Image (cartoon, grey):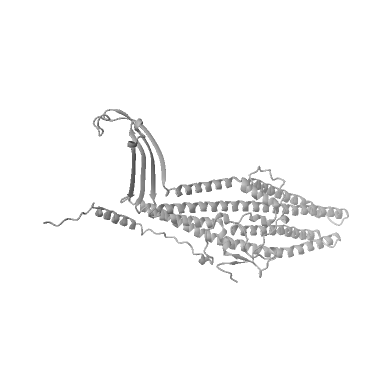
Amino acid sequence: MSEPTMHQGPRLPWRPLSALLLLALGACATQQDLQPAVKALPATQLGLSEPQPTSSAEQPQAWWLAMGDEGLNQLVQRALAENPSMAVVRTRLQRAQATADVVGAADKPRLQASSEVSRQRFTENGLYPAPIAGSDRTIGTLQLEGSWELDLFGKQRAELEAAVGQTRAAEADAQAARLLLSTQVVRTHLQLARLLAQREVAQRTLAQREEVLGLIRQRVQAGLDTHVELRQGEGNLPEARQQIEALDEQIAVARHALAAFTGQAPDALRTHTPALVRLQPMAMPAVLPVDLLARRADVNAALWRAQASGHEVDAARATFYPNVDLRTYAGYNAIGLDRLLQPGSVQWGLIPAIHLPLFDADRRRASLRGKIAEQDAAVASYNQTVLQAAQEVADQLGMAQSVARQQAEQRQAQASAEAAYALALQRYKAGLGSYLTVLSAESGVLRQRGLGVDLQARLIDAQVGLAKALGGSLDGAPTTSSPSASSSSQTPRVALGGDRS
């Protein structure tokens, strides 16, 4: 008597599944040798702390208010609202946000309704028997269709993180554009104020030379001077008027630039007259903490792009793994619209699927190599941005310190020149000195007056440059009491990786 056999149940295709699994593992292993070649520059190499990406909302705003000029504030606000370049930046940000929304919806289930009606003649020699065969029939379909691609290997997640990173980089770009535009407006406003101050010096020079010319004429009539001194005095007037005209030309150009920045007609600011005395120098910090450098929008944008490129590499690697998705449908289908909604016309289906390309002529490897190359380029760009940021901070800080020291020396030189000119003019009036001595002393005074205006404007411009280099603000750092009187023993210093004496 034979022994009873046990029921084995349906036999699963283990061998084909095992072969498919081995092929998948082999395909996944073919990309492990592709790795990035460029590494992020260690912040400690520059004496900096490691930066962290920040939201654009954390970026400092309205930094120009520290200068205390209401006219400047109105110009900057109008430029940020009306300048066409800001509209371009905003549209780029909106496009990046829309792209992130599209990518973010990729891993969500999708459901759609469909309705279809067709008129069809059925062949007499096909699959359908009579009376359908050889007849003309109307076919109707009404159903819901759903699909869901399972993100088992993180492809959609990596793509979403990359898109979010690009959106945040676009936000940082928008902040950088705001900072650049506001800095251009401030510097042009400052340049206009410098030119107007120089014009005042030139006007005082012209008036001074007219007074001296009147004195020369009196001395010529008294027989104390010759026509040589008279011709010299007369020749100085056209030169002074020519300098005023040249300054008027530059003033007009500066006003046109401000009008363009603020989206106005070229002559809209022809009466705009800023003054250096109304521009308050910003308080210089005694120590510049490293976290101020992390406020720079371009550093944040480069960091976000480098991180986004890394997520794009992850998404490209995920293409080497199987793609699993689920599809389903449920609804009605019938031959003849009069029977479409009958219970017997109900149909449904569930279709799980696994897809794994086994041979694609190295398309996935080529795509991965391209993404890795983009990541290397993004990391290299970030390294360059950090290096440039550190250099700009050092340059602007050194410039501000140097100009402050030059300004202190210039004040002493101007006081001496003014005293020498007054003494030379007194001696000339008393007949104890020559007119050449007066001209020489006058040249020194005029040079020092103009230099004083330039140094004052350069000091404010250097502080504006430092604020821009630090992302648009000097807030968060202890300040010195007098930015224009800092000495070599009390100059600001940069705390790199900690407070260093």
Name the outermost residue toward the top. 135
Q: Is residue 152 found left or right of 397 in the rendered image? A: left
| Residue 181 screen position, x and y as percent | 61, 51
Residue pictured at 85% horizontal, 63% vertical: 432
| Residue 17 screen position, x and y as percent | 27, 53
- Which quarter of the image is occupied by the N terminus? bottom left
| Residue 298 screen position, x and y as percent | 54, 56
| Residue 278 screen position, x and y as percent | 72, 55
Name the outermost residue toward the bottom. 501
Name the outermost residue toward the right. 222
Quarter of the rendering containing residue 476: bottom right
Q: Which residue occupies the foreground of this view, 499 or 241?
A: 499
Q: Is residue 8 found left or right of 162 in the rendered image? A: left
Name the outermost residue toward the front. 1
Q: Which residue occupies the foreground of this view, 45 or 267?
A: 45
Q: Which residue occupies the foreground of this view, 240 or 129?
A: 129
Residue pictured at 38% horizontal, 55% vertical: 153
Q: Is residue 145 found left or right of 77 in the rendered image? A: left
Is residue 476 positioned above or below 114 on the image?
below
Q: How many marks?
A: 0
Q: Is residue 424 found left or right of 337 in the rendered image? A: right
Quarter of the rendering containing residue 293: bottom right
- Which quarter of the image is occupied by the C terminus? bottom right
Residue pictured at 57% horizontal, 59% vertical: 295
Q: Which residue occupies the foreground of this view, 377 or 115?
A: 115
